[in-house]
Image: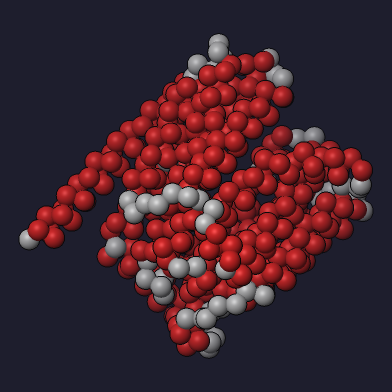
Amino acid sequence: MEASLWKNRSFLKLWLAQLTANIGDQCYSFALLWYLLQATKSGSALSVLAIPEMVAGLLFYLVGGVLADRFSPRLLMVGADIARVAVVIGVGVMAAYGIENFAFFLAAQFLLGVFSSVFQPARTVALTNIIPLESLSRANGILDTTFRTIRILAPMTIGLLASAVPLSTLFFVNAGSYLVSVFFVFAIQYSPRSRQENHTSKLTMQQYRQDIATGVSELRQNQPLFLILLFGNLGYLIWLVTYNVGFPFLAERMNQGDGSTLAMLMGFYGIGNLLGSLYMSRAYYTRHLFVILMGWMMQAGGFLLLTGGISLHWIAFLGAALAGIGGPLIGIPTVTAIQIKASETNVGKVYAINMLLFTFFGMLSSILGAVWLGKLPVQQLFLISGLFLAVLTVVGLYVEKHKNTQKHQSFGA
């Protein structure tokens, strides 16, 4: 990790804000899943928990992108965190009193999705204000590494905490983490861009539509950036169902229903994620699309290895780790390309469009899983997924090579 980034006080504060918020989020996720499992005893109920958040993203990511480009990202992040504090406290109070109204928890998930749709584009824009362009990739890598490290290490500690205190306490821990995040974010200092100073009037519907049109127009004119967003998200058409359905069914076939096998598979995938993030936090690259395609190729190789995991368990763990390495190679270059290649007045909107693509393909993946892929034998699921991602990579490499050839020819002319 580059020392100069840690000497940047604003980046350090942003990193500390994410660190505390991520720990709190893990507490919330654990507590919510366990509380609702005890309340409903229904796997179907737990499976729909992600839907309200996805719907909120589809409805509000573009709103968040427009706001991030027009107003102070720091104040937007502070406002979003304060709003999330209120929602999480409400959930904690419901859990403390043993209220099991499932519709309330779905509504809370929707609201958290709304405020995340504001926070994430604002954070993406804020990073461009406090980090030099040449350091954005490393900064994104560090933030991603932090998130993935917490996701691996936190559940064990949270499990011990949950055994010692009432489950509702974890929701209040999450609320406290957001308050700490507010403190660090508010302390960030940077020189706001002139565009943020100019757009202080009330945002009208016509201005909102014009801003969205500007973001879409940029992607039409900036074809390399559009291709990065397309290939950076197209693989999620198959990935989500493969991870959510394939891993549990493979673990069941490997060890006849032993839950520890699923934990190990996910653990090896998480370790791969962490290794990929650590690599990306130090890597220097300019061909963002090429790195993204290499990430999908690693995912493809990992899924193909997983087809042999039932008979040879070590191959399954190796495949999970290899697939995990590919994740950061896809996500980090995508965000960095948006921050670097989009015009500074459209970073938030282009990021929002990227998240819309991710949500759209993720929902299609869930539908595919329900009507077809989820019903296949697990080896076929991993085989189809691996081949799809391999074909996606080959097509992407051809497109990238063709665009580079055209670019060199235009320079030669």
Q: Position of residue 169 (x, y in %)?
A: 87, 53
Q: Position of residue 249 (x, y in %)?
A: 61, 23
At x 62% / y 27%, what residue is drawn? 265
For the residue pair 150 and 38, the one nearer the viewer reads as 150
For the residue pair 214 and 18, the one nearer the viewer reads as 18
At x 74% / y 41%, what residue is drawn? 155
Residue 272 horizontal side relative to residue 399, left or right: right
Residue 174 horizontal side relative to residue 63, left or right: right
Quarter of the rendering containing residue 178:
bottom right
Q: Is residue 183 above or below residue 138?
A: below
Name of the residue lying farthest toward the left: 413
Name of the residue lying farthest toward the front: 3
Name the quarter where the C terminus is drawn. Answer: bottom left
Name of the residue lying farthest toward the top: 311
Q: Position of residue 286 (x, y in %)?
A: 34, 54
Q: Report the colour scheme.
A: secondary structure
Q: Is residue 37 above or below residue 359?
A: above
Q: Position of residue 370 (x, y in %)?
A: 54, 33
For the residue pair 387 and 103, the one nearer the viewer reads as 387
Q: Is residue 252 above or below residue 59?
A: above
Residue 388 horizontal side relative to residue 116, left or right: left
At x 75% / y 66%, what residue is drawn? 180
- Total numbered labels: 0
Residue 84 in view of the camera = yes
Residue 271 horizontal side relative to residue 408, left or right: right
Residue 32 in view of the camera = no
At x 29% / y 63%, what residue is drawn? 222
